[in-house]
Structure formats: C-alpha cells, structure tokens
Amino acid sequence: MRLHLLTGLCLAAVATPSLAQVQQNNPNAANRSFENDSNVRSLQQEQTTQSDTLQMNSEQNLSATPAPNTGPDAIGPRGGTGVIGR
C-alpha cells in the first residue's frame, strides 16, 4: 500500500517533464527529469516483481497442499492430541 502511495506521489512530481526539459536557464533540468522518470520506472518494476513473487508463492502453496483423503479407505488420525506432554 505504501508503495502505491509513493509511486503516485512520484508520478505527480514528474507529471510535467516537458516543462523541465525546456528550461533554458537550467541545463540540468532535463537530466533531473530523466532521473525522475527512471526512479518511477524502478519503483513500478519493483512493485511488479513483488506482486509476481507473491502470486507465485501463493500458487505454489496451493499446489503443494494435498487433497484430503475422504474416500471409503480413509484412515483417520492416530494417537492423542498431537501435543507433546499432555
């Protein structure tokens, strides 16, 4: 959630790159604009990577969960409560 807000603020800050690039009295304006654009792209890539990783982990967890054995030959749990010392 914080990353979404940070990305939104960065996008708002660089919403006018063309104005920065045409400033004749500031030769570094275009470089700053390109730097801001690069930072926004980096944040977006990081957000995409984190989202993809989360999705992949979720899919792996779902596929690794065995289906319950509920057929006619199912064997119930054995032993006590499963807690040691009781």
Image: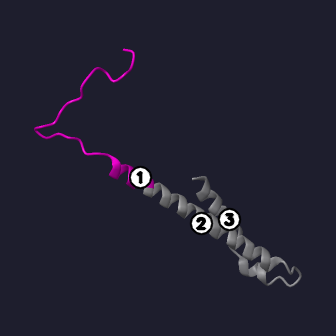
Amino acid type shown at disc 3? Cys
- Discs 1, 2 touching: Cβ within 8 Å: no
- Discs 3, 2 touching: Cβ within 8 Å: no
Q: Characterize the local packing of mark 2: few (<14), some (14-19) or many (20 or more) Cα atoms within 10 angstroms.
A: some
Q: Is residue 10 left or right of residue 57?
A: right
Q: Is residue 9 left or right of residue 72?
A: right
Q: Nearer the viewer, residue 63 or 54?
A: 63
Q: Which residue is mark 1?
A: 58
Q: Which residue is mark 3?
A: 10
Marks 3 and 2, how far apart in space? 11 Å
Amino acid type shown at disc 2? Gln
Residue mark closest to the camera, 1 vs 2 = 1
**Residue at point 39%, 15% (across, down):** 85
Residue mark closest to the camera, 3 vs 2 = 2
**Residue at point 16%, 36% (across, down):** 74
Q: Earlier in the sequence, mark 3 or mark 2?
A: 3
Rendered image quadrant of residue 70: top left
**Residue at point 68%, 72% (across, down):** 38
Q: Which residue is mark 2?
A: 44
Rendered image quadrant of residue 39: bottom right
Marks 1 and 3, how far apart in space? 30 Å
Helix, strand or loop under label 1: helix
Residue stretch in magenta = 57-86
Q: Nearer the viewer, residue 26 or 55?
A: 55
The rendered magenta stretch, by its main secondary structure, is classed as loop
Amino acid type shown at disc 1? Ser
